Image (spheres, rainbow, N blue to C red):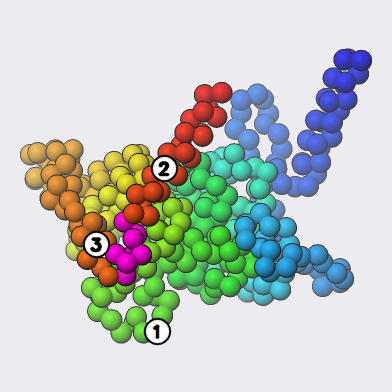
Amino acid sequence: MMLRSAKQSLLLVLLLGLARVSDGFLGAAAAKAGAVRRYRIPVLRGPSTTSGSCSRAARGDVDSVSQAAAYSACSREWQQLSGLMVERRPESYGVPEEHVQQLYRATWYLQDRSTVIQRALQVAAAAHEGQKRKNGDAFILHPVETAIILAELKMDLDTVVAGLLHDTVEDTYVSLYHLEALFGSSVASIVKGDSKVSKMTVEAAELSVAEKREINHRAMLLAMGADWRVVVVKLADRLHNMRTLQYMKREKQVRIARETIEIFVPLAHRLGIQSLEYELLHLATSFLFPDEIKGLLGVEALGHWARLLFWGALDEFLTHDQVLSETDVQGQLCSHRQKWLAHSNYWSIAFAE
């Protein structure tokens, strides 16, 4: 009896493996044990116009990326985006194959939702097509790298998808309405929280640079107080921007480095994400001070001094801004630390087992 049960289990495993390969979601199996698995990226198409009915959930039921993914290929919103996008592989939009493979390796723990990540990558790649960064790279590399940082932190599916799409509403034709319809309200909410308000409203265009920065910080912190995942996406976004800051003009390097130490390093500290906190501080210090001073005192010592120099800038903004003070954003941010600790402890236990 036990032998028969073992044979049935083996047969079931083989059938499931064949089904997954035939669906085209995964590439060929690794050539040998321990080899890196490679994934084939399918071209995600909109619904067929001749297929007749297509089931979809009611809009009121779509509050997560998993629910939205169940019907998004058949939605009117996907048809609209498909009309704007040429249905090609992400590599043809400027996403290097190695970055695509790196993304799928990093999201190994989300393989049962790999088609959602593939759809988000296609939407982001098509939306950012033709856009370039200061160093000449395709812009899509930035959201891909942001998503990889989030995956390395083992963030949930909604957060990783939001990382891929976090610049679409701000810089492309894709709207929050599209994102909510395709990926759920949770993803749309995170993307909205990480988007600059000054780029999304006509009134803000007339404000000074300092006023734009203030309203962007206020809106960002309000969103962060409501959802701790907004903080993590913003930290991942800022970390990749800091890793490529050498291509900016010196004046902008200093401004962004100072802002990083004033706002983002303390945010990472409050959540307890030490890896992001230390790398952000190290990079910001490297750009903030001239080479002569760094050679004399060292980056680590200067980092401690810079932290003390700008200590309290975030607290001052949180307490003196009326809107942030009335909504107790400072208290909300402090409570997020427990959520991150619970998240990191879960994965620590999972890896230990």
Circle nearer the N terminus (1, 3): 1
Q: Is 4 on the left-hand or right-hand side of 99?
A: right
Q: Is residue 138 visible?
A: no
Q: Report x, y in % for residue 197.
A: 39, 73
Residue with the mark numbered 2: 338
Q: Report x, y in % for residue 15.
A: 84, 34
Q: Which mark, residue 319? A: 3
Q: Is residue 104 visible?
A: yes
The image quadrant that residue 57 belongs to is: bottom right
Mark 3: give few (<14), some (14-19) or many (20+) Cα within 10 Å: some
Mark 1: give few (<14), some (14-19) or many (20+) Cα within 10 Å: few
* Marks 2/1: CA–CA distance: 38 Å
Image quarter (top left, top right, bottom left or bottom right) of the N terminus: top right
Circle nearer the N terminus (2, 3): 3
Placement of 214 over or under 314, stated as above or below: below
In the rendered image, residue 113 lying in the magenta stretch gets the answer no
Residue with the mark numbered 1: 202
Placement of 155 over or under 241, stated as above or below: above
Image quarter (top left, top right, bottom left or bottom right) of the C terminus: top right
Residue shown at 58% from the left, 64% from the top: 185
Q: Is 50 on the left-hand or right-hand side of 57?
A: right
Q: Amino acid at mark 3?
A: Thr
* Marks 2/3: CA–CA distance: 22 Å
- Label 3's element? helix
Residue shown at 25% from the left, 45% from the top: 281
The image quadrant that residue 275 belongs to is: top left
- Label 2's element? helix
Residue shown at 65% from the left, 24% from the top: 33
Mark 2: give few (<14), some (14-19) or many (20+) Cα within 10 Å: some
Number of on-image labels: 3
